[in-house]
Image: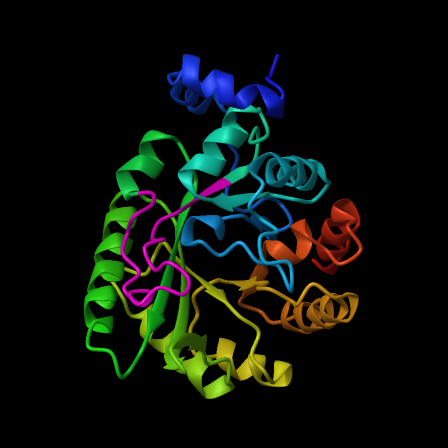
Amino acid sequence: MSPRISDLPALRARHPGAVAEAAARRTRRPLLGDSGRLMIVAADHPARGALAVGDRRMAMANRLDLLERLVLALSRPGVDGVLATADILEDLLLLGALEGKVVMGSMNRGGIAGAAFEMDDRFTGHRPQDIARLRFDAGKLLLRIDYDDPGSLATLEATARAIDAMAERQLPTFVEPFLSRRVDGAVRNDLSPDAVTRSVAIASGLGGTSAYTWLKLPVTDDPDAMARVCETSTLPVVLLGGDVGGTARGQEAAYEKWRKALRLPTVHGLVVGRSLLYPADGDVAGAVDTAVGLL
């Protein structure tokens, strides 16, 4: 019998080996099912200190509340899996919520939101050997490139070597690329069609092989230009959700953008977090079901 969420603190203190035991017995599944579509719920934001949803500054700070939302989301029909850091994935493992799900480890979370070193997004999360050891199914990494920051070259090299190490283990890597810059000290991602196109071209060529590389892309500011963006590579694509502002209007606008982009031939699904886990109306199941319906 799986523990309750409220049992996790005591279980972690008394039986740390329970994580490895749960990972060893977890039932796995192929990355893509019969539908050829993926619906992944993302929850790796807290490890970068990114806890806000819309105007709720600390919305994701309560871990037990976040886990309740995740367990509910993962229980909905059509949800294929979850993307998160080790702490969250291991909580979900202990709860038995990852049976038959795609489990995606978040690899680089060193670029703490708002920090002077935010663009130096080092690999502080899952390593390829961790993902393999825990029998997880894929990894995800964030690649922000600032043309004015010489440090972006180190980020590119580290990303390429991570892709190589994952491919050696025949594990898919979902690369989330952006062209970014600092505006009044804050990091801003450029979502113009030209910028997203360049980011796709750069990310697609990283590593000694692209056989196991997927792209995790934002929908551009001009949704009608997304088809041109996706023509930049033959690599499979999933769409990211992002923070839609915590309003019903923002949520509906996001659904419409995803609906259009999901028609494109290289787009295979969605990886969405805050907008589904913390919808404006509070109905997690309804938000998840709507997103699944778009697929």
Relative to 68, is 16 above or below? above
Instruction: Specify start and end residues of the magenta stretch as a single range.
Output: 103-126
| Residue sticking out furthest to the bottom | 194
Measured from the top left, where is residue 249 in percent x and y? 77, 71
Residue drawn at x 42%, y 18% is: 13
Measured from the top left, where is residue 56 in percent x and y? 64, 58
Between 133 and 88, the one lying in front of the other is 88
> Is 142 placed left or right of 52 in the picture?
left
Measured from the top left, where is residue 259 in percent x and y? 70, 68
Residue drawn at x 61%, y 51% is: 59
Residue drawn at x 49%, y 57% is: 50
Q: Is residue 122 magenta?
A: yes
Report the quarter where the N terminus lies. Answer: top right
Report the quarter where the C terminus lies. Answer: bottom right
Residue drawn at x 31%, y 60% is: 121
Task: Say whether residue 208 is visible.
Answer: no
Between 151 and 182, the one lying in front of the other is 182
Task: Say whether residue 63 is visible.
Answer: yes
